[in-house]
Amino acid sequence: MASGNGSIAQAIIDAALQQNFPAQIVAVVCDQPEARVLVRATTAKIPTFITPLGADRKHWDDEIFATVESLNPDLVVSAGFMRILSPEFVSHFKVINSHPALLPLFPGAHAVADALAAGVSRTGITVHWVDKGVDTGEVIAQQPVEILPNDDVASLHERIKIIERALIVSTIEKIVLSMRKTDA
Ligand code: GAR
C-alpha cells in the first residue's frame, strides 16, 4: 500500500523480481489516482487498485477492506501509505508499516520535519506491526540516521529513505520466511 512517489515500494518490487526473494507482490493498493507508485507498479506488471478517500470515511474503510480481502495477502505492507487503516482492517490482516523516525519518537505524517524541529542529533527508521493506534504497534526493526548540521527535510528524508529501502526489504524477507516455518 502506498500513496505517493513509491520509492520504498520500488525497492520491494525490485527485490521481489529476484529469484531467491521469498515473496511475491499480488498488488499495489493506492489512495491517490495520480501517484507515481501506480506507474512503477504498472511498469512491473503488478495489478493496481485505486481507492481515493471520498466524503464517506466508513465507505472508504469498507472499500479498502474488501479490495485487500479479495487479494488474500499473507502480509500487507504499508510503504508510504499516508492514511490510517481502520481497527477492523488492522485486526483482520497482518500489516507492517515503514516509518521515517525512531518510534516512539515522532509518530504521524510529518516525522522527518518533526525530528528536525525538535533539534535531535539523530533520527531513523522503524518497521513495526500496525495496530489500532497511529504508529504505536510493536517494533520489528529500527535503524538510526544521523542528522547533519545543514540538513533540511528533503535532504534528511532522502538519506533516511536510502536505509529505509534496504530495511523494509530485509524485514519482509525475515517475516515471510518465519511465516513459512510456522506453516510447515
Ligand atoms: C517513506 O519515508 C515512508 O516511511 C513515509 O513516506 C515515505 C514514502 O516515500 N511514510 C510515512 O511517513 C508514514 N507515516 P516514497 O513515496 O518515496 O516511497
Image (cartoon, rainbow, N blue to C red):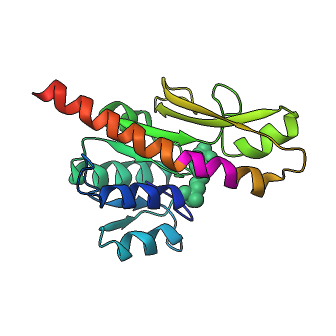
**How many numbered callouts?**
0
- Residue 57 placement (x, y as % from top left): 50, 50
Residue at left offset 73%, top offset 44%: 112
State whether residue 16 is above or below residue 102: below
| Quadrant for the C terminus in the image | top left
- Residue 36 placement (x, y as % from top left): 52, 71
| Left or right of 155 on screen, residue 163 | left
Residue at left offset 60%, top offset 52%: 162
| Span colored in magenta | 158-164
- Residue 2 placement (x, y as % from top left): 48, 56
Q: Quadrant of residue 119?
A: top right
State the residue lying farthest toward the left: 184
Reply yes or no: does residue 152 show up in magenta.
Answer: no
Reply yes or no: does residue 163 show up in magenta.
Answer: yes
Depth order, front residue of 168/69: 168
Whether residue 55 is visible to the viewer of this picture, yes or no, is no
State whether residue 10 is above or below residue 91: below
Q: Main secondary structure of the magenta part?
A: helix
Residue at left offset 30%, top offset 61%: 17
State whether residue 142 is above or below residue 37: above
Residue at left offset 75%, top offset 50%: 156
